[in-house]
Image: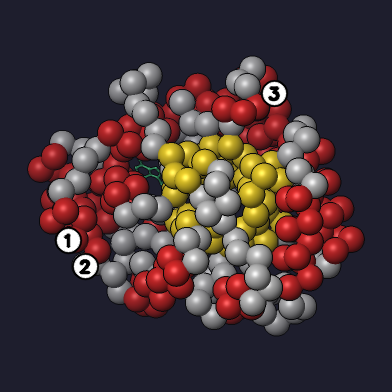
Amino acid sequence: MTNESTTIPTLELNDGRTIPQLGFGVFKVDPAETERIVTDALEAGYRHIDTAAIYGNEEGVGRALAASGIARDELFVTTKLWNDRRGAADTRAALGESLEKLGLSHVDLYLIHWPTPQTVSPVETWETLATLRDEGLTTSIGVSNFDERYLPAILETGVIPAINQIELHPQFQQRAATALAAEHAIAIEAWGPLGQGKVDYAATVIGEIAERIGASWAQVTIAWHLASGRIVFPKSNRRERMDENLAAAGVQLSAADVAAIDALDQGAAGRVASDPAEVN
Ligand code: NAD
């Protein structure tokens, strides 16, 4: 399977910027292997890379980006502020450290990684992200894991995030968080888009659709996210799966197939990873 002909769709964000809707995530990618794996992803055709300070692999991402020779304006790079960095001075320092590791003068998107509700309020930190954006150190700003319990405090500042990156996959569709985001034209990035490999989606209607249309269950799941207007960056260390996942951009689902996958939602019972209330 080659991706030479795969066109990656883009979305326009509420700040007027453009983001590739399908990218590559590097959570749990070993720092020692990151340069090789991100190089493979760039060769496969990915141009949007999602990392975070806590992943410990920003240097490897940066080396792969530099070695690729791909023009900076063709790349979309996201990183995230970890939970032990808060407040104006520390947030500014943390972004500086990430940029240094990535070897970049700016990122395309900077996110507050978790709301950490049991520690300090995120308001000063959020307002600092807006300042860093105005200074050009990040093009867009957003939040991660700010579901309907935590997004209102951000909205009250009057600075509207471009993005909310939340756990979202067929059995955990976060309807309240996505409805609140939609009211403010905040784009949703679905992390764990394939259920982090913890759910047997091939055994559901997704497997039936996949067999009928000649795609894999992962491709059908990615195509469902794209058809639903979300941004995704599935992770794989394996080049053949990178190719497979990227080719999902060419998989068309009928409205009935999208509705059948929508029906897999189990609400809060479908969560497979951490509840933001418990991450501090
Ligand atoms: P994911 O849903 O992308 O699952 C990744 C796993 O799915 C892989 O390890 C592999 O086992 C499997 N997989 C990948 N492609 C496959 C294929 N074609 N066929 C079969 N299995 C396949 O989970 P993820 O990595 O946790 O999420 C994607 C990205 O989201 C991360 O890499 C990271 O960038 C981001 N993320 C963000 C947060 C956050 O708190 N903001 C948390 C977790 C992940």
Q: Is mark 2 within 8 Å of ligand 1?
A: no
Which of the 4 image quadrants contains residue 123? bottom right
Residue type at mark 2? Ala
Q: Is residue 204 above or below residue 19?
A: below
Locate residue 145 relative to residue 98 in the image: left or right. left
User: Of label 3 and label 2, which has the lower sequence position?
Assistant: 3
Residue receiving disc 3:
66
Residue receiving disc 2:
263
Q: Is residue 235 above or below residue 86?
A: above
SS of the residue under disc 3 = helix
User: Of label 3 and label 1, which has the lower sequence position?
Assistant: 3
Mark 2 neighbour class, 10 Å CA radius: few under 14, some 14 to 19, many 20 or more: few
SS of the residue under disc 2 = loop
Q: Is mark 3 within 8 Å of ligand 1?
A: no
Which residue is at a point 48% across and 31% down the rendered structure image?
46
Q: Give the image location of residue 214, x and y in percent.
A: 15, 36
Q: Is mark 1 within 8 Å of ligand 1?
A: no
Residue receiving disc 1:
260
Locate residue 239 relative to residue 165 in the image: left or right. left
Locate residue 125 relative to residue 161 in the image: left or right. right
The answer to whether residue 143 shows anywhere in this view is yes
Q: Give the image location of residue 68, x and y in percent.
A: 62, 20
Residue type at mark 3? Ala
Q: Is residue 20 above or below residue 190?
A: above
Quadrant placement of the N terminus: top left
Residue type at mark 1? Ala
Q: Give the image location of residue 49, x and y in percent.
A: 57, 39
Mark 3 neighbour class, 10 Å CA radius: few under 14, some 14 to 19, many 20 or more: some
Locate residue 185 relative to residue 240 in the image: left or right. right
Q: Residue furthest left?
A: 212
